[in-house]
Each structure stands twice: as C-alpha cells, then as structure tokens.
Image (tube, rainbow, N blue to C red):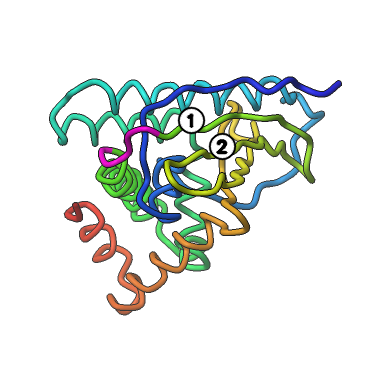
Amino acid sequence: MPIPPRRMPSTLMPNDRRGVLALIGGAAAFSLAPIRGWSLDANQARALIDTALGEVYRVINSGQQPAQMYRDFEAIFARYADVDVIARSALGPAARQADPRALAAYTQAFQGYIGRKYGKRFREFVGSKIEVTGARPLKSFYAVTSVAYLNGRAPMEVEWHVSNKSGRDKFFNIIIEGVNMLASERAEIAAMLTARRGDLAALTADLQASG
C-alpha cells in the first residue's frame, strides 16, 4: 500500500548542491549484504529518516556555539548512519588490509571528521525544507524518497538507502539527483590516503585534526 507523504518542516538554506548534500547527509554512504528476512519494513525505513532530519533541525535551531553543534551532528551521524560500513567504503581496498586497531581508530576519526565537515555547512541553512515522500524495497535494502525545496531553486530529488544489517535500522547511502554520496566521500578519502603514501595512521591523524 502506498505510504502517504508527510511534510517535514525545517529551517535550512543550502547555497548549492554540495550544500544540500551536506544538509541531508550528515553523514555519508555504501554496499551491504542482503537483509535477512526483510525484518525492516518501509514504515521503519521512512521513520528513521524522518527522525534523523528532525534532530538535525533541532540542532540548527538550538542557538548553540559551533563546537557544540558539531559534536551534536557527529552524535546524529553515529546514531542514524551505519558508520562502520560508511567508513570502510570510503577507505576502499585499504580497509581489507588494515590492522583491526588501526581501522577502528580510522573509523572513529572519520566519524568526527564527518560531524565537523557537515556541521559547518548546516549552520548556513535557513529557510528550506525536506519532504519525505515514500519508501520502497530496492535490492537488499529500502530506498526512502524525499524532495528538498530550496529558496529560489528548483526542487531536488533525494534518495536515502536504509538497511538493518548492523542489527539496527541505519542509513548507509544518499543519492541526490544522481550524485552518490558514497562516491564523493570515497574519492576524497582516496586522494587523502594517496597523498600520505597509503599511511592509514597519518590519514587518521589528519582526519582527527581536520576542521
């Protein structure tokens, strides 16, 4: 049965498509194994995105200092995104070769890096809204569809990929008008790792210091 759209009010204004990516990504994206028995359903997938967006809006409207806002955005990312999957996907083949402790340190650093990176953009957004419009099964996960309405710009289609492979409902990818968030993060992390001659510890240190 189709899921009726529900309007999500917000107070956000992105400057461009990269800004929208930051707004709705808080986060970032990825490939998963099949969901066992489809224990996740469309309503749950949609509810996850509704709830995550609501928390983003509350932080933006809180009037907190930037440093606290960045910590809150990192917490939202950790709560609603599959951080381990996202971090490994962004790292690419190097994740399979990494020492477990080094990989864990990188994953924690990546989480903080994402929180600060997108948190800086979140503070710029006032006056726009994202409306969640539906959810459907897609391959081994659910795709939650939404539309971003921006001041002075045409609406933008946004699709969230949600799974419960980790044991909890989490989003693991975002597609904005054909632009894959995972691909963007993977390219950036790959360039950073190459610049450090494949040294994962150096990449981790730089991610910890960034922002």
Q: Residues within 10 Å of mark 2 (few under 14, many from 20)?
A: many
Question: SS of the residue at dot 1?
Answer: helix
Going by the numbered disc 2, the residue's amino acid type is Phe
Structural distance between the alpha carbons of marks 2 and 1: 6 Å
Please give the name of the residue rendered at 46% of the width and 28% of the height, measured from the top-left corner: 53
Q: Is residue 133 above or below residue 54?
A: below
Quadrant in which the N terminus is drawn: top right
For this view, does 110 lie left or right of residue 207? Answer: right
Instruction: Give residue 95's position: percent from left, percent from top.
Output: 47, 61
| Discs 2, 1 touching: Cβ within 8 Å | yes
Task: Name the disc covering residue 211, or none.
Answer: none
Number of numbered discs overlaid on the protein picture:
2
Please give the name of the residue rendered at 63% of the width and 41% of the height, measured from the top-left corner: 161
Instruction: Give residue 21's position: percent from left, percent from top.
Output: 45, 49
Quadrant hosting residue 118: top left
Question: SS of the residue at dot 2?
Answer: strand
Going by the numbered disc 1, the residue's amino acid type is Tyr
Please give the name of the residue rendered at 30% of the width and 71% of the height, measured from the top-left corner: 199
For this view, does 11 lie left or right of residue 138? Answer: left
Residue 185 shown in magenta: no
Q: Residues within 10 Å of mark 1 (few under 14, many from 20)?
A: many
Q: Which residue is mark 2?
A: 171
Magenta-tinted stretch: 123-127
Quadrant hosting residue 18: bottom left
Please give the name of the residue rendered at 32% of the width and 65% of the height, measured from the top-left corner: 200
In the picture as drawn, the residue positioned furthest to the front comes out as 152
Q: Which residue is mark 1?
A: 80
Mark 2 or mark 1: whose residue is earlier in sequence: 1
Instruction: Give residue 62's position: percent from left, percent from top.
Output: 24, 20
Main secondary structure along the magenta-highlighted residues = loop
